[in-house]
Image (cartoon, helix red, strand yellow):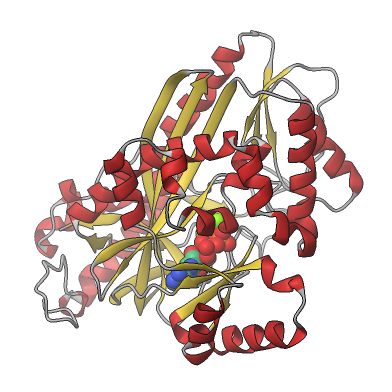
Amino acid sequence: METRQGIATKEALDLQSVDQDLVQKMVYDALVWSSLHGLVVGDRSVQRSGKVPGVGLVHAPFALLPVSFPESHFREACELAPIFNELVDRVSLDGKFLQESLSRTKKVDPFTSRLLDIHSKMLELNKKEDIRLGLHRSDYMLDEQTKSLLQIEVNTISSSFSGLSCLVSELHRSLLIHYGERLGLDSKKVPGNSAVIQFAEAMAKAWTEYNNARALVLVVVQSEEHNIGGQVIAVVYFRAGYAPTDYPSESEWRARLLMEQSSAVKCPSISYHLAGTKKIQQELAKPNVLERFLDNKEDIAKVRKCFAGLWSLDDSENVSKAIENPELYVMKPQREGGGNNIYGEDVKETLLRLKKDGTDEDAAYILMQRIFPSVSLTFLMRDGICHKDHAISELGIYGAYLRIKEKVIMNEQSGYLMRTKVASSNEGGVAAGFAVLDSLYLT
Ligand code: ADP
Ligand code: MG
Ligand code: MG
């Protein structure tokens, strides 16, 4: 198939040509498979869902077939995982760099400011994290025009979908084992995915290194009590704590501070959390900054290659360019979890307003080059219904890192996540209803 640039690529499948009867069979099998193998999420339309185990479950949104992805770019993304793991660790140790890079943001963003306060307190106490556990996910899009793999962001807190992503890879393999011949596809070209096992292994190893057989692993989740009284905690895993709404009162902030002060292994520590902010991503993209944290020249070159254009809003030249061509940019605040970015005409309006106000509010955001991946037809499955739409994909590569003082116990690429969303939506997460979980078919 010819892409828009006219460069021939081995397209895995021309969806237009797939027989409707075959699609219906695959849809049926995929839905049965999802129920049998736990590719399910809570069903919001069922009142008792999420309260009573086993009640109100529905298949997770998924793509019926894996999306084609060039093997070379997949390898490139996998190779970057251990380098980013190391980079996050190094950056986390430079307290001054974190505080200074975020100092202007601190003035205008109360949430980031609170995180920085906890971080400052740890610096004052000279608190050392001897055991450091990172469960990260670095996300990429393949820019169609330049054919380059560009990083969207790196997540250092609550890196989601390590469980469901493995199941989607298995579902796709299973469908291709049954229908691959008729589709002209080979199930072996869906790469294996063991993200959930590798993450669990890293957490278990951190627990082992803590070396207290009676100690527990605490998982901090949304809308749950943080019960940490009376038991020794070896590892705190934050599945929540990345959004302002996770701290409805002072007691959540006190709990976060207490956990940070404790001897438990935090995943992430406050320094790892801050190292994953968009502002730090943008600072690392400045000339000669990566060199401060990485020694290996080849690693530095690999990392730099995946950086898209990233600018601070005090860069008036690029702000002017963004006002002229807002559709080529994305504006991002220091937030996680999707739905926070600014696109298109809103970029122009916001930049003009910030310019006019002349306050420090611009420091809350970074400006990023918008990446345009190639669009392909996809069967999207949601609520048992299959619909065909033009879609784009984002590849996430998980990374697990465990270190005890100078000794690196684990530094690996740990599986992947492919998310596919309708091309017309700017963002739209899996939960928000625009994106589905996917896997990849190497070409
Ligand atoms: P979050 O931490 O909230 O997930 P992201 O930086 O990942 O923030 O942005 C959310 C979504 O917005 C991404 O999943 C992607 O779909 C879209 N997005 C973010 N940055 C870009 C970009 N530079 N070009 C195109 N789309 C982007
Ligand atoms: Mg994120
Ligand atoms: Mg993201």
The residue drawn where x is 13% and y is 53% is 186
288 lies left or right of 190: right
Q: Residue at x 69, y 66 (%)?
A: 364
Q: Which quadrant of the view contains residue 208?
A: top right
- Give the residue displayed 30% in from the left and 49% down from the top: 301
Drawn side of residue 124 relative to residue 421, left or right: right
Please identify the quarter of the rendering in which residue 384 is found.
bottom left
Quarter placement of the C terminus? bottom left
Residue 430 seen anywhere in this rendered image of the structure: no
- Where residue 438 appears, as percent x and y from the top left, is 36, 58
Residue 136 makes an appearance in the image: yes
Ligand 2 lies in which image quarter? bottom right
Q: Which residue is at the front of the view, 396 or 297?
A: 297
* In front of the other: 237 or 312: 312
Q: Is residue 35 above or below residue 194?
A: below
Height in image: 385 above or below 300? below
Q: Locate the N terminus by quadrant.
A: bottom left
Asked whether, in this view, residue 392 is left or right of residue 25, the answer is right
Q: Residue farthest to the front?
A: 288
Residue 3 appears at what percent x and percent y?
A: 17, 79
**Image height of 404 relative to 68, above or below:** above
Q: Which percent across, then down, holds residue 198?
A: 42, 31
Q: Residue furthest right?
A: 250
What is the number of callouts on the image? Answer: 0
User: Where is residue 15 shown, x and y percent of the image?
Assistant: 21, 75
Residue at point 81%, 27% (across, down): 228
